[in-house]
Image (tube, rainbow, N blue to C red):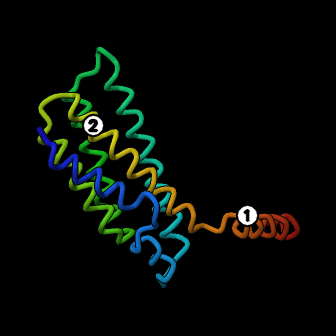
Amino acid sequence: MNKGKIKELKEIKESVWLKMPVEIANLLSNTGPLQPAGKIIYAECDARILHEFLWDVRMMLYEKDTNYNCAKQFTMVLLKYFQKKFSGLYFLKSVANVIKLVMEGINECKESTEFLEFVDEFILYIGRISMWLDLLIPWHYLNQTFKKHARLRSRNHY
């Protein structure tokens, strides 16, 4: 059993539950092309997409005709893809490290109940990360800017 890695994942989840991780808050001070808005918006989008994919995996595991090994392989491909994005593109190393921990734990799973426990805990973790990222986005001002741009664009016909 993977009880040590599950316990670690639960502790990490609890550590980000009530307080925004410093690494996420620090995204606001990034500079460079499309920074900080681009990195924050894209990271939130990817966290949400990963969250949604994991819900689909979770639902698959409850279907009696699901091939456990296929579900496990599919999940590993997804996690590897998003781990690279959070590490290399968004520089959210702690999120990438949690994904790595989950991959290691899932890789060691011998039965679907263990796998499901990892998926359940990680859904909660990545959902909370998505929420913290979303809170950094000034949606009202962003929407007002888009509305202003749409009005200007309609006058200039471009």
Which label number is shown at residue 158?
A: none
Neighbour tally class for label 1: few under 14, some 14-19, many 20 plus, Cα within 10 Å: few
**Does residue 15 sit above or below 72 in this rendering?**
below
Q: Amino acid at mark 1?
A: Asn
Residue that sits furthest to the top in the current view: 64
Disc with the residue nearer the chain's start (2 vs 1):
2
Q: Which residue is mark 2?
A: 117
Location of residue 7 in the rendering, given as x and y in whole percent from the top left corner: 22, 49
Left/right placement of residue 120 relative to residue 36 reads left
Left/right placement of residue 104 relative to residue 65 reads left
**Does residue 57 sit above or below 27 in this rendering?**
above
Q: Residue at x 47, y 50 (%)?
A: 48
The quarter in which the C terminus is drawn is: bottom right
Residue 68, image quadrant: top left
Q: Which residue is mark 1?
A: 143
How far apart marks 2 and 1 lie (CA) works out to: 39 Å
Q: Residue at x 45, y 78 (%)?
A: 26
Q: Residue at x 33, y 47 (%)?
A: 122
Location of residue 41 in the rendering, given as x and y in whole percent from the top left corner: 53, 64
**Does residue 35 sit above or below 124 in this rendering?**
below
Location of residue 97 in the rendering, given as x and y in whole percent from the top left corner: 25, 62
**Does residue 130 sit above or below 90 in this rendering?**
above
Q: Amino acid at mark 2?
A: Glu
Location of residue 34 in the rendering, given as x and y in whole percent from the top left corner: 53, 76
Task: Check disc 2 and report its element: helix, strand or loop.
Answer: helix
Q: Residue at x 23, y 49 (%)?
A: 102
